[in-house]
Amino acid sequence: MIPASFDYVRPSSLDEALETLHDQGEEAKVLAGGQSLLPLLRLRLAYPGTLVDLGRVEELRGVADRGDHVLIGAMTTHYDVVTSPIVREHCPLVALATATVADPAVRHRGTLGGSLAHADPAGDLPAVARALDMEFVARSAGGERVIPAADFFLDYLETALDPGEILTGIRVPKLGPGWGFHYEKFHRTAQAWAIVGVAAAVRRSNGAIEEARVALTNMGATPVRATGVEESVRGAELGANGALRAAASRADEDTEPPADLHARPDYRRHLARVLTHRALLAAAGTG
Amino acid sequence: MTEQLDAGVVARQIKEGDLLGGPGGGREVGRARRRKEDARLVTGRTQWTDNIQLPGMLYVAFLRSPMAHARITRVDTSAARTQPGVVAVYSGQDFAAEQGSLPCAWPVSEDIVIPDHPPMAVTEVRYVGEAVACVVATDRYKAADALDAIEIDYEPLDAVTDMTAALDEGSPKVHEAGNKAFTWKFAQGDIDAAFRDAAVVIDRTYVQQRLIPSAMEPRAVVAQTDGDSFTLHSATQIPHVLRVMLALTTGIPEHKLRVIAPDVGGGFGSKLQVTAEEVLCLLITRRLGKPVKWTESRSEGNLTVHHGRDQLQRISVAADADGRIRGVKVDLLADMGAYLMLVTPGVPLLGAFMYSGIYKMDAYDFTCTGVFTTKMPTDAYRGAGRPEATFAIERAVDELAAELGMDPIELRRRNWIRHSEFPYTTICGLTYDSGNYEAATDRALALFGYDKLRAEQADRRERDDPVQLGIGVSTYTEMCGLAPSRVLGSLAYGAGGWEHAGVRVLPTGKVEVVTGTSPHGQGHETAWSQIVADALGVPFEDVAVIHGDTSSSHKGMDTYGSRSLVVGGVAVVQACEKVKENAKQVAAHLLEASPDDIEFSRGEFRVRGTGASRTIQEIALATFAAHNLPDGFEPRLDADATFDPDNFSFPHGTHLCAVEVDTETGATKIRSYVAVDDVGSVVNPLIVEGQVHGGIAQGIAQALFEEAVHDADGNLLTTTMADYLLPSAADLPDYTTDRTETPATTNPLGVKGVGEAGTIASTPAVVNAIVDALRPRGVQDVAMPCTPERVWRVLDQAGTAPRAGAQTTEGGPA
């Protein structure tokens, strides 16, 4: 399809981009890798007055080790995230989940910041952000603020970012030793969105699970933490398959899974339980 | 791979340039030549319709009905006319006097209802996506923008979305004449006797879901006129048929209309059509005197490219206790959609003679009812009728085997036509000229490691493994090479099934082949070059193939139904024979010998028993000069031939599929897939391999992924590729392919056609495997596409799905 007409600006610095956003107000829309926004434009489901393309804002790209956390620039492509030695060493769950995003072409264009700011609950990375308690660094003409993941995703395709704000980077806390990770994605084709996904991080100690973090993809309007599972699984022995299964059976508590062509809600609930069990097993069994 | 080695065989690896042998021990035929057209097709350095730019060209965008069924009560295009760049805005009313009705060339029965089908709706719309207005503007963006300014009021009418309900007395009507398009019956033998006292009767209903053909190149049209004559470029499979039909529809005299199919990027039947957009672009260029272009978007295509399949099949099989099939009864509902397009009603008839498959039986009874609904019309889609028939009989035979507790291969052996019985006239009245089902099946079983997989299946069942293994069998045949003209006539089709070829020998000895078949990705240029190289003894590189333009390839029936090689290729052979005959006259004259003493071999004409000879290139030059030719000889070697086959061709094969089914999630995974096809003699094994791979992928796609979904109001919900799932290479398994070669006896090349084989064979193989995996859990069928959710629900209903945690009763929308 053909998008409706819009103005297009391509600033070369963050300040310039913020200035443009400030001037244009709600008419402006930030373009990152374009893997979600461009289809919406072409289907005429979005009619922004101005597109502010961040493609030339180099300062928003890259991965840095900041001691207790890893800072990933919002415009870092999925490909660069997956291949970053820092990410692979300190935030393996991010690398695991990002490697499942769509296909290589999308991963070379799409960005971490773009997919988080798009806030599609069917996207893989919002759930990972919840599981790892990432922090979102946002800048506006007025200054910078940091938004915890728990406060970032407000509703379907809606975040805590103000119209004048740009997501500049994501802080991924380093979890330290003893953690195992897994992202369990269930989808019909390699390029399709997850019907349900489960991001799991498990800290093991003395043959038992000491702490677990579990977040779900596509089980509601926003990514959700499966707190019931996290509570239940604490203290479970690593070999206790029954205990893990019992904990996983709480995965769909307090969720409102959507109905679409690929799955009705009861099936999603079922999948959430099965996949959470698998994700816990995998996370508990890996180093 | 291990199992293949264990079985003592390794699948044939085809390499570039391999000479695998072929009919007559030809040097080129049988060789795995890389395709000469691919460089330009793959790099895009060629003329696709959308690449065409003409001076002063205007762009057309169509406004499409948002309602499945409604009366158009008001149209106001005045605001749109004032939008920037807009040259003209038309609604159906503007074309009403001249647009005619889109043609249906296959009035299958006496009782058929062929409703008027205006290219642009005038008073009533009958499916979502039907064109109701259009904008012509200076660029495609302005054209698209101005669509928003057209105002149309609709008075909603009831949608008709379900075929069975549509036939109820009180159903809302799609057309005034009612919702039944036709009834077509065919019977042979005493069906009542076959079913009476039968030890076992299998009675099943299968749904052939509606599919949306997704050619890589979307449809595109460029129309132009010089004020007198017209040229239409279209991404079509059928430039020749289209020219005739457009002339009849628009009143533009046939000799004033040239139709060009430049390079075309796939069709799968979807471009075997006379479309509303083609007619309307011609009418617009006639009005404005300027060239116009229209290229569809993918979403527009999902709505308005003709759809495929969509049948409800009730099949009954009666058999003796030892598994011998006595008779087959088929009652079919076929969804026509809102109108009958080019061959819409004929599609189920192409399957009508194939429900007996490769099996012998005493009686057969077939009834098909065509039904109108308020949806996009259906029409040919890869296999057209034959995939549906093959699916039903191959599914039912597996069900019969299960019912009898018999191995599905053994049951087939007891019923199939034995190699020694060919030629064999089936219960449906078709004469299968050749085949060897034993050889193909034995080869497939060995490659597959059948016994080993059965053992693993038993083990998984024993262990109650959450991942179960199923094995699916499909021993298919198909009728290809459409078609003997007399047979088409007896089925009330509006045209013949012959094909034309011309062979021109240029002064330098190079050769141009003019073919009436119209490639859209098949590789005609390569295959025809191989045929001509052998026939005339010229180098492969010295042959060019001309196609797809009614002014240069003036005569043809185009490409569909696995007909190009079987009919068009044979025409090329026959034209070459005439060329050789002409050349022999010249050779004899130059060599001062009698034509009867001239032998031809590998491009040389030689006087028998002497060393004197002339090459075909020398003869070409001598003929061009024409200084010294036999008295009365027309100075030309060129020749035309038109071939009308006596019979269809009948490729066959055995496909075996192993599927792992995760009973916890419903996910399925194809573990291994073996295809042994017998497509007769092979001109180019690389092309055959490609056709088989693509065909299998398309058949798997129907089994597992693709489905056009409408809501109760008739809205298509799968308008994008996010919702209409096409598998990519990442979603498909490796295939193990091999061939047996049982040459067709009905044509000089011994070829049978391969364009549809994989698609016809693979769908039942996959679904049979899934059902086989789950049968011990009480599952008899899984509706296509066998999505994870469907598999899980079937298990859930059978009460055998493993539970993860708490029971839930939440259902959500149906």
Image (spheres, coloured by chain):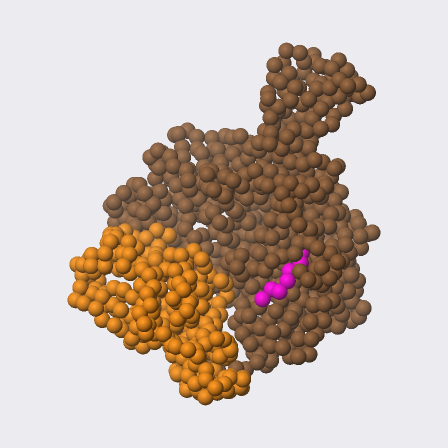
Q: Is residue A41 visible?
A: yes
Relative to B740, residue A169 above or below: below
Q: Depth check: B725 or B285 in front?
A: B725
Q: Depth check: B721 or B451 in front?
A: B451
Q: Position of residue B814 (x, y in %)?
A: 47, 73
Relative to A166, residue B437 above or below: above
Relative to B666, residue B89 above or below: above
Please name the residue shown 67% across and 60% down the image. B1
Please name the residue shown 41% across and 83% down the image. A211
Please name the residue shown 45% across and 57% down the image. A104
Secondary structure predominantly adopted by residues drawn in magenta: strand
- Which range of residues does the magenta coloring cover? B669-675
**Chain B painted colour:** brown
Q: Is residue B411 left or right of residue B126?
A: right
Q: Is residue B390 visible?
A: no
The number of callouts visible is 0
Q: Position of residue B510 (x, y in %)?
A: 60, 26
Please name the residue shown 36% across and 74% down the image. A174
* Residue B278 is inside the magenta segment: no
Corner quadrant of residue A35 = bottom left
Corner quadrant of residue A252 = bottom left
Q: Is residue B121 left or right of residue B747?
A: left
Q: Position of residue A69 (x, y in %)?
A: 33, 72
Q: Depth check: B201 or B189 in front?
A: B201
Q: Position of residue B447 (x, y in %)?
A: 71, 59
**Chain A painted colour:** orange
Q: Is residue B186 left or right of residue A190?
A: right
